[in-house]
Amino acid sequence: MSVDLVSEIERLKKERNAVILAHNYQVGEVQDVADMVGDSLGLSREAAETDADVIVFCGVYFMAETAKILSPEKTVLIPDPNARCNMAAMIDVEGLRALKAKHPSAQVVCYVNTTADIKAECDACCTSANAVDVVEGLDADEIIFVPDKYLCAFVEKQLKERGVKKKMIPWQGFCPTHLRIIPNYLKALKEKHPGARIITHPECTPDTNRLADAVLSTSKMSKFAAESDAKEIIVGTEVGMLHRLQTDNPGKKFTSATELAVCPNMKLITLQKVYESLRDMKFEVEVEEEIAKKATKAIDRMMEFTG
Ligand code: 13P
Ligand code: SF4
């Protein structure tokens, strides 16, 4: 017997007192059943504030882990535990400790795209929406920034524009999905759509971001799309973002910089798996208490610098 997934998800959500949080890169039908669709920062905040007993996190593992750290008393489920961030997998605790030993007076900032054990090693966490404010706010002249070297370059550039001097020491990680958004794609699209604005994500390379009218986190992309007078916008980030932008702004045209910008891990979450997750209460996300305690400090520090 086939089940109507959407109505079953709705029924189970009530039965379990559950909330579904979905990242902007989720497939459209998963975004459509979510109680909230957002970026890493917005979803973390929602996870901390919701009074639901169960959070079904539709995103990659580090996001669900962050929700669990912020809400240890809640049951946090991820519909597919194999949905991991490729960038988060590029750093390990041993390597980070070695880098810290080389720069003992530096403070360490980690992008939220890290596992809990990496967050536990850091002074402050950040997302792409608040990275510049977090780094500026820390009382240190030297900052080790992990794991995204391109977000680090973006922060460095913004700090320079603000007249803030800090030595940035990047980890050499990157997002393979955003690396696919090469400058030539943007140049060709700009020629084809001369009136369009270009927005890109800080995870893109500096060469790609140089061609953009604005470099924005996914939540800031939503804001830009709603407030801009541009009728056409070229979007340099993961393709899932287009669903959100198009749904919220039906009168505007959005074009993906490249259909190759797909995060295979985000796409592991399907409507069927969301249904099974609520039905069978799987897969439960757990974070070791000691690690969670240390990681919470880094996340709380981030919140201090976030308006
Ligand atoms: P945002 O925080 O901007 O949503 O980005 C998260 C992410 O994984 C981008 O690849
Ligand atoms: Fe990680 Fe890149 Fe996927 Fe974002 S798009 S979750 S950074 S692999």
Image (tube, grey):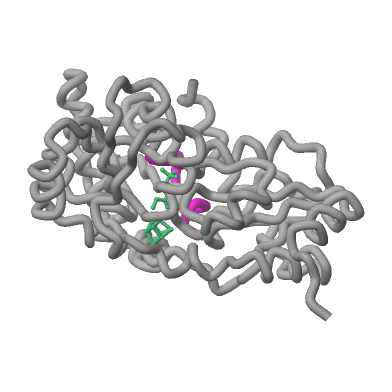
- Judged left or right of residue 264, residue 103 is left
Q: Which one is nearer the viewer's eye here, 50 or 246?
A: 246
- Residue 110 can be seen, yes or no: yes
Q: Tell which residue pokes out farthest to the right in this image.
A: 15
Query: Residue at the location (71% across, 69% down)?
Result: 283
The N terminus sits in image quarter: bottom right
Q: Residue 206 in the image: x percent, y percent?
A: 14, 45
Does 58 sit above or below residue 226? below
Query: Where is residue 240 drawn, in percent x and y?
Result: 44, 54
- Between 129 and 105, the one nearer to me in the picture: 129
The residue most toward the front is 251
When the figure is inspected, residue 3 is found, relative to residue 186, above or below; the finding is below
* Part of the protein shown in magenta: 118-128
Quadrant of the image occupied by residue 228? top left
Q: Does the magenta stretch include residue 124?
A: yes
Residue at 57 percent across and 35 percent down: it is: 300
Q: Is residue 130 visible?
A: no
Magenta segment: does it hold 243?
no
Residue at image position (63%, 52%) is: 292
What residue is shown at x 71% (from left), y 56% (from top)?
56
Q: In which quarter of the image is residue 11?
A: bottom right
In this rendering, is residue 214 above or below 57? above
